[in-house]
Amino acid sequence: MAGTLTVQNIEGPSSGSDANTILIPSGQTLYAPGHVLQVVQATYATETVSGSGSFTDTGLSVSITPTSTSSKVLVMVNIASAGVVNNSGADARGNFRIERGGSTMLGSDIRAYDYGNSGSILFGAFFLSFLDSPASTSALTYKLQQQLSAGASIRVCEGDNTIAMQAMEVAA
């Protein structure tokens, strides 16, 4: 039988051993909204170059299994030393995205342009973050993918620098 309990105030003992105790039914867990429940991290340090016009895996991914369907997952990616190259034309352009289960969670466009048409290159560090609401307690895998839009190549881990991805389960 389901029901609703509405209360204006709850008062417990003001002193003694039970003064700061909250009773939770057996088998249930109480999480305060906004608190981090777990953190997982993955790193990757192999230069990965692509000339594909389709999204391809960079090699960086992280898996997390939420403890509650109401949890959110904050995914953060530090893309150190990544870039786009065009050896002989003006435009070098590409995209990075955080992907889960075939769906784009967040995308980012990077671009270098040379008005002299002698070639373009852009390398730098990039950061992506996305707060996901997966409504799942199954294992979730988040991947960093890359796609070349114009130019010769897009790459991560230039010079075998390390890139990292973290996933944090946040109570909702």
Image: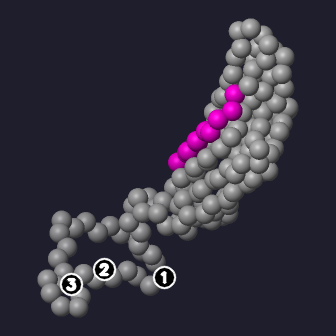
Residue at the far left in the pictured view: 14
Most foreground residue, 118 or 109: 118
Most foreground residue, 86 or 147: 86
Q: Which SS class for mark 2?
A: loop
Q: Earlier in the sequence, mark 3 or mark 1?
A: 3
Q: Which SS class for mark 3?
A: loop
Instruction: Find out whether residue 124 is within the magenta segment.
Output: yes
> Residue at position x 69%, y 28% from top?
122
Q: Which mark is residue 35?
A: none
Residue 132 image point, x, y percent: 56, 49
Q: Can you identify the residue that label 3 sits on?
A: 19
- Quadrant of the drawing holding the N terminus: bottom left
Q: Can you identify the residue that label 1 sits on?
A: 27
Name which residue type carries label 3. Ala
The answer to which quarter of the image holds residue 19 is bottom left
Q: CA distance from mark 3 to mark 1?
A: 23 Å
- Quadrant of the drawing holding the C terminus: bottom left
Mark in front: 2 vs 1: 2
Magenta-highlighted residues: 122-131
Q: Residues within 10 Å of mark 3 (few under 14, many from 20)?
A: few
Q: Is residue 114 left or right of residue 19?
A: right
Q: Can you identify the residue that label 2 sits on?
A: 22
Name which residue type carries label 2. Ile
Residue at the far bottom in the pictured view: 17
Q: Residues within 10 Å of mark 2 (few under 14, many from 20)?
A: few
